[in-house]
Image (tube, rainbow, N blue to C red):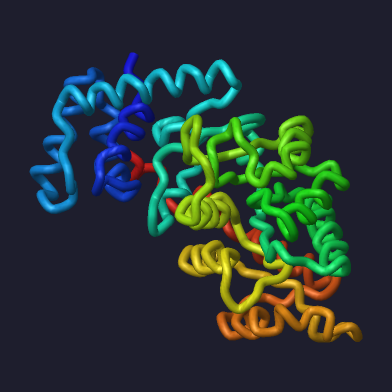
Amino acid sequence: MLHPIACCLAFLSVPGIGRKTLFDFRNQIAGIDSFRAAFSLLMDIQKKFPGRIRSLPDEGAFLEVLSSSQLILEKQEDMDIHSLFFTDPRFPVSLFDLSVPSVFFFYKGNISALEKKCLAMIGSRSLSPILEKVGIHAGSFAASHGWAVVSGLALGADTALHRGGLDAHGILIGVLPTSLEKVYPSQNRALSQSIIDTGGCLLSEYPLGTNASPARLVERDRLQSGFARGIFVLAAKSSGGSWHAIQTAKALNLPIGFFDFRSFPAYSVYSDFVQGIDRLVHMGAFPVSNSASFTEFLNRCNSVSCCSRFSPTSLF
């Protein structure tokens, strides 16, 4: 049986077709029942948006890509890498609210981890030892209060926050900019396995054999906010990768919190992140400096229902 995600992968191989196009034609893709029907839909997309497809493949070349995509999905299943399409009731419909919506992703581990309250926890890759300790404590605090920690498995903040979640025996979710047989960065391979072993999961939009790239890092960052009810920023400079996730959270009207070090005696050790805090304050983010303020921030996040962010009745 032709898998709809194989169709998605084949469509994405066509120059000019991206995830927004998949979203626009998601219901038609869900109804594809043959290789010929997939190519017919490709022709329909070209007719509706004549300037979108920059180079239309011939039918034979497209069907070859489609066949290869089907084989990739089968091989992934043999590696315990599973697929989730938007028609599956477990699919988080909040991903439809993203500026670049997602209609499928791959996972390894316990997909029911997404049923928990999810908090995206992010920050800079360059942390001082003090900030690393704060990150471990923050991840532990969130996990011990029933939140699944969502992060990108990068070095620095992501690693510290995930480590804290593990210390609290929490559920962790790692979102990768590569396919799931890889771990990026490779230094976190053991951490990624610990996430799976403790009931969490790894997620990715990319099929077998996909390496990290700047564009995929940006796409990964938006997904972190898409899975979450709020976002906590451990430390961020005035620009950088964290801001892709922060801006996505802002667009989704999610609560944004940040570690507020301004009242600490050793203020100067955080000097690299002062402008980042100024920017977060300017956008109305919530300052977190102790357990009480962190609890208040989590309460704000708790008031956000992912399921209400996109009506399930409009899925089909």
Q: Residue at x 56, y 16 (%)?
A: 78
Q: Residue at x 28, y 36 (%)?
A: 11
Q: Viewed as shown, does residue 56 lie left or right of 294?
A: left
On the image, the x and y values in percent for residue 137 come to 86, 60
**Foreground pick, 232 / 300:** 232
Return the residue found at the far top.
1
Above or below residue 155? Residue 183 is: above
Q: Residue at x 13, y 53 (%)?
A: 51
**Foreground pick, 110 / 147:** 110
Q: Is residue 218 visible?
A: yes
**Foreground pick, 46 / 304:** 46
Above or below residue 6? Residue 138 is: below
Q: Viewed as shown, does residue 168 lie left or right of 254?
A: right
Quarter of the image containing the C terminus?
top left
Q: Viewed as shown, does residue 279 lie left or right of 97?
A: right
On the image, the x and y values in percent for residue 315 come to 35, 41
Q: Quadrant of residue 100?
A: bottom left
Q: Quadrant of residue 202?
A: top right
Q: Is residue 308 visible?
A: no
Total marks in image? 0
Quarter of the image containing the N terminus?
top left
Q: Viewed as shown, does residue 303 lie left or right of 27?
A: right
On the image, the x and y values in percent for residue 209 come to 50, 32
Q: Quadrant of residue 186?
A: top right
**Foreground pick, 248 / 211:** 211
Q: Residue at x 75, y 52 (%)?
A: 159
Above or below residue 253? Residue 81 is: above
